[in-house]
């Protein structure tokens, strides 16, 4: 959540990081699952329907370096269906 690209968009849109991230997820055709029961955050989440990301702003998300938060090592075993991390991740780097 500390991406300079997202921070730049939050400043220009006067929105929070979660709002910008949720908006981008929604505009990609995915359904974000939020878990907050905090009334202020719930209100903030609903405000994402009141504005749009420009095409340029949406394209900036592709500049954010990607990394996995989960290695998948627990699914790799010589006796299991995945013999290596490469096989588990379908040879993705």
Image (cartoon, grey):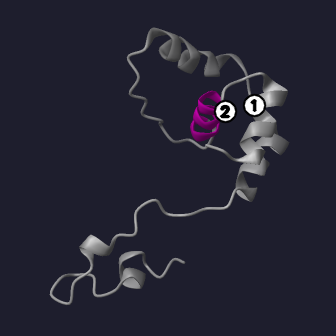
Left or right, 87 with respect to 7, comes to: left
Q: Quadrant of the N terminus?
A: top right
Tell me the residue at 58%/40% (across/down): 25
Tell me the residue at 20%/90% (across/down): 78
**Image x and y of residue 65, in percent:** 67, 61
Left or right, 39 with respect to 82, comes to: right
**Image x and y of residue 29, in percent:** 56, 41
Tell me the residue at 58%/33% (across/down): 22
What residue is disc 2 on?
20
What residue is disc 1 on?
10
Figure label count: 2
Q: Is residue 39 above or below residue 49?
A: above
Q: Is residue 60 magenta?
A: no
> In front: 67, or 57?
67
Pointer 1: residues within 10 angstroms few (<14), some, or many (20+)? Answer: some
Give yes or no for contact between labels 1 and 2 (Cβ–Cβ under 8 Å).
yes
Tell me the residue at 26%/71% (across/down): 74
Pointer 2: residues within 10 angstroms few (<14), some, or many (20+)? Answer: many
Q: Is residue 18 magenta?
A: yes
Give the distance between the C-alpha atoms of the residues marked 1 and 2, in whole angstroms. 7 Å
Element at label 1: helix
What is the magenta range? Answer: 17-26
Q: Residue furthest left?
A: 79
Disc 1 or disc 2, which is closer to the eye?
1
Q: Is residue 73 above or below residue 12?
A: below
Element at label 2: helix
The chief SS type of the magenta part is helix
Q: Is residue 75 above or below residue 47?
A: below
């Amino acid at each position: 959540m500390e991406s300079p690209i997202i921070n730049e968009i939050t400043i220009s849109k006067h929105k929070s990081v979660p709002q910008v991230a949720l908006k981008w997820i929604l505009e990609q055709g995915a359904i974000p699952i939020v878990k907050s029961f905090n009334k202020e955050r719930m209100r903030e989440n609903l405000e994402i329907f009141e504005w749009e990301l420009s095409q340029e702003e949406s394209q900036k998300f592709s500049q954010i370096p990607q990394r996995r938060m989960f290695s998948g090592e627990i699914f790799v075993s010589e006796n299991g269906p995945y013999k290596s991390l490469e096989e588990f991740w379908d040879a993705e780097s």
